[in-house]
Amino acid sequence: MLDLFAGTGALGIEALSRGVAQVDFVEPARAARMVLEKNIETLGLAHHALVVAKDFRLALGDALRAQKTFHGVFVDAPYALGVEEELLEYFAGGTLLAPGAWISVETARKRDLPEQSGDLSKCREDRYGDSKLVLYELGN
């Protein structure tokens, strides 16, 4: 799995607690990354986690060159960045997703995301306060 804009790692760590074998956490912000690394160490998950201290574009380029594939991706970018569509297009047009993979995107409630992006199809959208979660699945 991939946890982009991981922050303290809550989503990826929860995935590990539910049996996911490996999570790559991408977090460029030093303060958040320090908390993330401490959380991983405290929970004894270091052998299941890779923490990447880079901008998401550089991290995705590295993953592509390493021929990684992910079965699930969490995206929780700062809303002001407005990179949700860019990320959907990147994943839809590349080889980073395994067949049947999913992407969970948290965004601002008022932001409209596309129903379709390449082979990615929106399958669920839930609103919570000022936020919403949008789930996409990759067609086979």
Image (tube, rainbow, N blue to C red):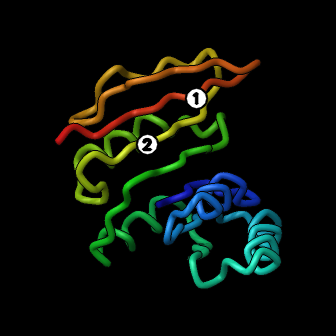
Q: Earlier in the sequence, mark 1 or mark 2?
A: 2
Tell me which residue sits at (39%, 33%) in the image: 136
Relative image position of residue 14 (x, y in whole percent): 66, 56
Relative image position of residue 40 (x, y in whole percent): 73, 74
Left or right side of 12 for 96: left
Q: Say if 130 sits above or below 13 in the image.
A: above
Relative image position of residue 41 (x, y in whole percent): 77, 80
Tell me which residue sits at (38%, 70%) in the image: 63
For this orientation, the residue located farthest to the bottom is 47
Front residue (pair 102, 75): 102
Left or right side of 61 for 20: right
Left or right side of 10 for 110: left
Relative image position of residue 62 (x, y in whole percent): 39, 73
User: Which quadrant of the view contains residue 6?
Assistant: bottom right
Instruction: Give the numbered dot on residue 106.
Output: none
Tell me which residue sits at (46%, 32%) in the image: 135
Q: Secondary structure at mark 2?
A: strand
Q: CA distance from mark 1 to mark 2?
A: 10 Å
Q: Residues within 10 Å of mark 2 (few under 14, many from 20)?
A: many
User: Which quadrant of the view contains residue 9?
Assistant: bottom right
> Given the image, on which type of amino acid does mark 1 rest?
Leu
Q: Are marks 1 and 2 in contact (CB under 8 Å)?
A: no
> Given the image, on which type of amino acid does mark 2 rest?
Ile
Q: Say if 127 sits above or below 137 in the image.
A: above
Front residue (pair 140, 26): 140
Instruction: Give the numbered dot on residue 133.
Output: 1
Tell me which residue sits at (50%, 39%) in the image: 104
Q: Say if 12 sits above or below 22 in the image.
A: above
User: Which quadrant of the view contains residue 65?
Assistant: bottom left
Q: Quickly name the residue at label 2.
A: 103
